[in-house]
Image (spheres, helix red, strand yellow):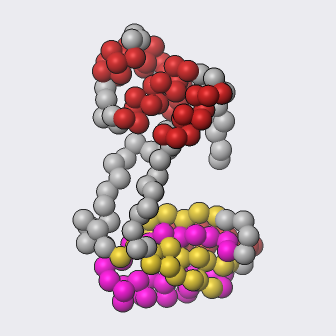
């Protein structure tokens, strides 16, 4: 389910920029930094959370540190009618870090983490065995060139305010 939120204003964007710079900042620290009251910051944070602005409150862990140094993206072609069951079955594969539905010739882009290339081969075979999965194509991750970021988008949004 998608949540929609009214347009962000300058205060929202300043708050988000401060949180992006210091994700562990307390409400009190954010209020001091932005020159706002603690209640204002808390109310804004609650509204932003209800509006679906925050994607996750969990810490992102390194798969490599957990013993899974090989990452790959699997381009997965599926029978569309079986997508709900495929999604359920993919979620049961512990090596699956993320999966995105795509438009175009490929239906899903699945990010996996594995111990070694044999583990990757076995993981790919388990995904191929899911009823409705027709084909996979695997690309090894050689390195992250640009990590997930929204800072530049905040700057663009700020121009619109």
x 53%, y 76%: residue: 74
Position of 70 relative to 5 (above/below): below
| Residue 120 in the image, given as x and y percentages of width and height | 41, 83
Position of 116 relative to 110 (above/below): below
**Left or right, 82 with reference to 117:** right
x 41%, y 63%: residue: 144
Q: How many marks?
A: 0
Q: Which residues are magenta?
A: 106-134
| Residue 91 in the image, given as x and y percentages of width and height | 50, 67
The quarter of the picture where the C terminus appears is top right
Position of 105 relative to 97 (above/below): below
| One can see residue 94 in this view | no
Camera-side residue of 149 and 93: 149
Camera-side residue of 34 and 103: 34
Residue 61, quarter of picture: bottom left
Q: Is residue 119 magenta?
A: yes
| One can see residue 35 in this view | yes
| Residue 137 in the image, given as x and y percentages of width and height | 57, 83
Q: Is residue 105 magenta?
A: no
x 66%, y 36%: residue: 4
x 65%, y 44%: residue: 2
| Residue 85 in the image, given as x and y percentages of width and height | 63, 71
Camera-side residue of 124 and 129: 124
């Amino acid at each position: 389910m998608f949540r929609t939120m009214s347009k962000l204003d300058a205060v929202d964007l300043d708050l988000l920029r401060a949180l992006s710079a210091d994700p562990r900042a307390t409400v009190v620290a954010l209020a001091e930094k932005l020159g706002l009251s603690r209640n204002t910051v808390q109310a804004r944070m609650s509204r932003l959370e209800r509006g679906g602005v925050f994607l996750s409150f969990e810490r992102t862990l390194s798969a490599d540190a957990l013993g899974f140094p090989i990452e790959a993206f699997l381009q997965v072609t599926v029978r569309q009618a079986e997508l709900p069951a495929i999604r359920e079955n993919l979620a049961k594969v512990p090596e699956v870090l993320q999966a995105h539905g795509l438009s175009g010739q490929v239906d899903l882009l699945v990010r996996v983490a594995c111990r070694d290339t044999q583990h990757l081969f076995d993981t790919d075979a388990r995904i191929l065995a899911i009823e409705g999965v027709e084909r996979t194509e695997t690309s090894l991750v050689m390195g992250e060139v640009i990590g997930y970021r929204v800072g530049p988008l905040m700057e663009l949004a700020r121009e619109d305010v």
